[in-house]
Image: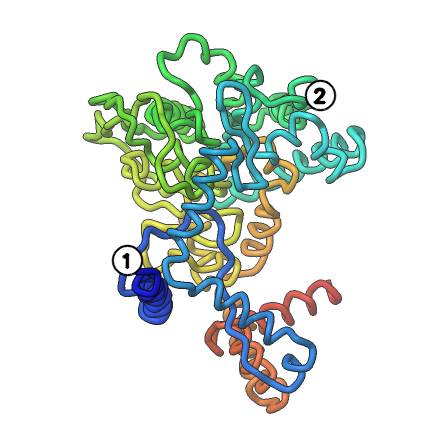
Amino acid sequence: MDKRQYHIIQFVCIMAILVAIALQGFTHKVKMKPLEGVVAEEQPVKLNFKNYLDGSYQAYLTEHAKRTTGFREFFIRTYNQMCYSVFDEFNNENIAEGKDGELFTYMYLDDITGKRVVDYFNSVDSAKAVARENVRVTLQLMDTLKQHGTDFLFVFAPSKTTVYPEYVPEPYCNQVSDFSLIDYYIELFKENDIPLIDFHNYFKEIKNEFPYPLYAKFGTHWAFGTIPFVADSILRKMEAVTGKSLPSIEVLDYNLTTDYFHQDRELEGQFNLLFPMDKPAIPNPKFVLTDTIGKDKPNLVAIADSYFVAFETTCFLHAFNSWNYLKYNDFVISSNPDYSWKKFALMPEAYDILEDADIVMAVFTAPMLYTYMFDFPNTVFKLFNRGEANDEEKIEMMIQNIRNVPEWYEAVVKQAEEQGITVEENLRINAIYVIENEEKNNP
């Protein structure tokens, strides 16, 4: 083969690859494994004179081209794999590798070193003062819920950094703060007889006796192997708090496997490698509810961070007649599919969900105590201080007021288009915003 023929074949191959990438970018016919991790949803931008002149439209087109490049997922995974295999580097700025390859997120590392306390409160004394005020509000919340026949339970979830500090990366292991906000909350809760489960300290006590890791090497939430025991402990505590008789959980098979449940490999997933990392076998247990005949089935409302996610697809939630998980007191995930992924504060059914609840359970780990329950107590106070009928009547009247003012209505329509939501949703959001501001200014 002469040089000319070689160049022709080389040219044809390169063009074929480029055409394949372009076709994939337009059609996405070849199904690729999606990239993992948090990815901001692209907001479409319409071309206008202003965004063309300031360059923001061109920037949007550049970002859009990156997102839609053919086989983008494969190229990113290949690059990440090369960095890891050749240079032993992870392309994720939120994750740190500790001893023996244990992975940690910086949010939890900043918590144990006291950096998070300084960032949020400036000093330990300020943090303690805020905690005392939050406990006072929690007692008020318990009283309010009790008036509506609802009990309250707070679950202090553990953290990998406090359960396994011996694996924390340098230099964090030498910078552990003397003050722990979660321990201070636990102390205050006990002093005020607020029902709680302290998994934060319990996990530290049992880590050498438990037959399997309490946290997976590549996970940041409690290992799925602990969930049946955690769930059964919660049911037993709920019995004590509510006086209701609840079923138990029985493990049928520990199912040791290297095929990890999602939460046990979530940090590895965020590296988006081409090939999976080597993993030791850990449990992916199979468990069921037992002793269910004649048991009560209360209605559950859970206000929680991501530590509640492990329960979503398990039999634990079958112990309840209905359940609603308020994720960060924002979106709802529910046994009622009509409620799921709606913003709780904007739901007409929000009052009914709380009114029908037999127990409200809060589940939070240490770093989430800095944004205490994501203002859930005030959400409850607002809903219970105003009847649903009155609220809905006010909202409907305000929506009609917006419709009656053409300029106002047109602005709401334009805002809905920009935010990618329906006009009706945005009318409700604006109506509630106006009502709450009026009530705030005219208490």
Q: Specify the amino acid type for callout 2.
A: Gln
Looking at the rendering, which quadrant does residue 194 occupy?
top right
Q: Is residue 401 visible?
A: no
SS at badge 2: loop
Mark 2 is surrounded, within 10 Å at the Cα level, by few (under 14), some (14 to 19) or many (20 or more) other residues, namely some
Q: What colour scheme does the image use?
A: rainbow
| Residue at 51% over, 28% down | 103
**In-image side of 277 versus 110 (left or right):** left
Answer few, some or many: residues within 10 Å of disc 1's Cα (few below 14, many 20 plus, some between 14 and 19).
few
The residue where tag 1 is placed is 31
Among numbered discs 1 and 2, the one appearing first in the sequence: 1
- Which element is circle 1 on? loop
Where is residue 187 drawn, in percent x and y?
Answer: 64, 21
What residue is disc 2 on? Answer: 175
Residue that appears at 50% across and 37% down: 362
Q: Nearer the viewer, residue 330 or 432?
A: 330
Residue at 64 percent across and 79 percent down: it is 51
In the rendering, at what x and y percent does residue 26 appear?
Answer: 35, 71
